[in-house]
Image: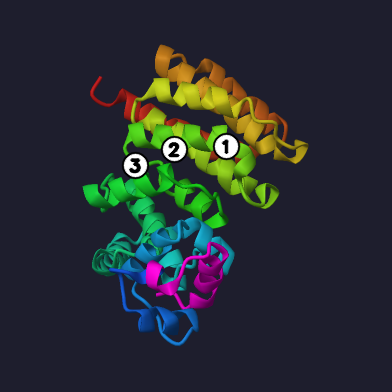
Amino acid sequence: MFKYGSTYKELRKQQEITQTEACRGICSISKLSRWENNQVEVEFSTAIELLKRINVTLDEFTERANINTEFELPDEIITAINANDVPLLRKYVQSRLDKYHTNKNILELKNILIVCNQLLLIEGKNYLTTADIKRIGSYLLHNTVWSKYNITLFANSPFLLNSEIGFKIAMRIVHNFDQVNDLNDNLAIFMGGLSDTVIAFIFKKKLDYAQQLLDELRKVELPPYFMFFDLTLTFLQKLIEYCQTGNEQPILEMFNKLIQLGCSRHAQILLEAFKDAKRIWEENE
C-alpha cells in the first residue's frame, strides 16, 4: 500500500518536520527515506501513523497524491448484482472482508459496501460486523474532505449504518455543503446518497430523523436541471406523511401526475420505494 512516498516527503518538508521526528517509534529512518523516494511500499497501518505525525489526514493525502479511489467492481459481480445472484455476492463479500480484516485498509471498504448494501436489500442481512460499521461511521463522521470517494462511500452506507450515526453524518454533510470537492460533478451522487438516507430512516421507522434531514435538504438550492431531486424530495415528504397517517391517496395522486407528465420511469422508481416502505410499516401491526 502507498507508493506515494514522494508526496509524503513534500508535505513533511512543508511543515519543517525532519525524517527523525516523522518516523520516531514508527519505522526506521532508512525505511522512511526509501519510501519517500518511491523505492519501497509501506504497510497501510504504518502510512496512517506517519501521516498522523505530520498532521495530515488520509483524506487530504489521497487528494494531494491523486490516489485512485474509484469504485470498480468486477464485471461478474456487476452481473451478479443485476441478477440478484446471492451466492456469488456472498462469496465476494466474504473474500473482501477477510482481506480487509487482515490489513485494516479503509480503502478496501469501497467495493465491499456496494455489495453489502445489495445483500442487505435482498436478504435483510448486514454482513458487516459491529466493528466494521463503527469504523465506517467514525471515518465518515470525522471526514474533512468530501472527495468523490468519500461521497460514494457515504452514498452506499445509509442502510448499513445505525440510525444515530447515519443522522449525524448526513446533517454534517448538509451543513458543510460548500466544502464538497467538484460539487457540480458529484452532486448527483451526493444528493442521491442523502435521499437514500432519508429513505433508510423511513424504513427503520425513524421518522424524526427522516423529517429533520428532509427539511435541511429542501433548503439546498439545486440547479434547474436537477428537477429529478425536487420531485424526489416532494415524494419523500408525502412518504413520511403516509407513514404517519396511513393515507396513501396523496402519494398515489403524485404517481398519476408524474405518468401524465411523461415521467413514467421516475414514477416507477418511486413506486417501488413506496411499496417497500408500505410493506415494512405494515409488518407487525
Q: Main secondary structure of the magenta part?
A: helix
Label 3 close to label 2 by CB (< 8 Å): yes
Q: Tell me if mark 2 has few (under 14), some (14-19) or many (20+) residues whose alpha carbon lies within 10 angstroms of its own.
A: many
Residue 97 is left or right of residue 144, and the answer is left
- Residue 5 magenta-drawn? yes
What x and y, as percent, mark residue 13? 54, 69
Residue 273 in sight here? no
Secondary structure category for the residue under label 3: loop
Q: Measured along the vertical axis of the image, is residue 130 above or below residue 250? A: below
Q: Quadrant of residue 81?
A: bottom left
Can you tell which mark lies on residue 169?
A: 2
Q: Quadrant of residue 232?
A: top right
What x and y, as percent, mark residue 235? 56, 27
Residue drawn at x 47%, y 58% as measured from the top left: 56
Magenta segment, which residues? 1-21
Q: How is the structure coloured here?
A: rainbow
* Amino acid at dot 1: Asn
Mark pair 1, 2: CA separation: 11 Å
Q: Which residue is mark 3?
A: 161
Q: Measured along the vertical axis of the image, is residue 61 above or below residue 3? A: above
Secondary structure category for the residue under label 1: loop
* Amino acid at dot 3: Leu
Q: Which residue is mark 1?
A: 176
- For marks 1 and 2, the one nearer the N-term is 2
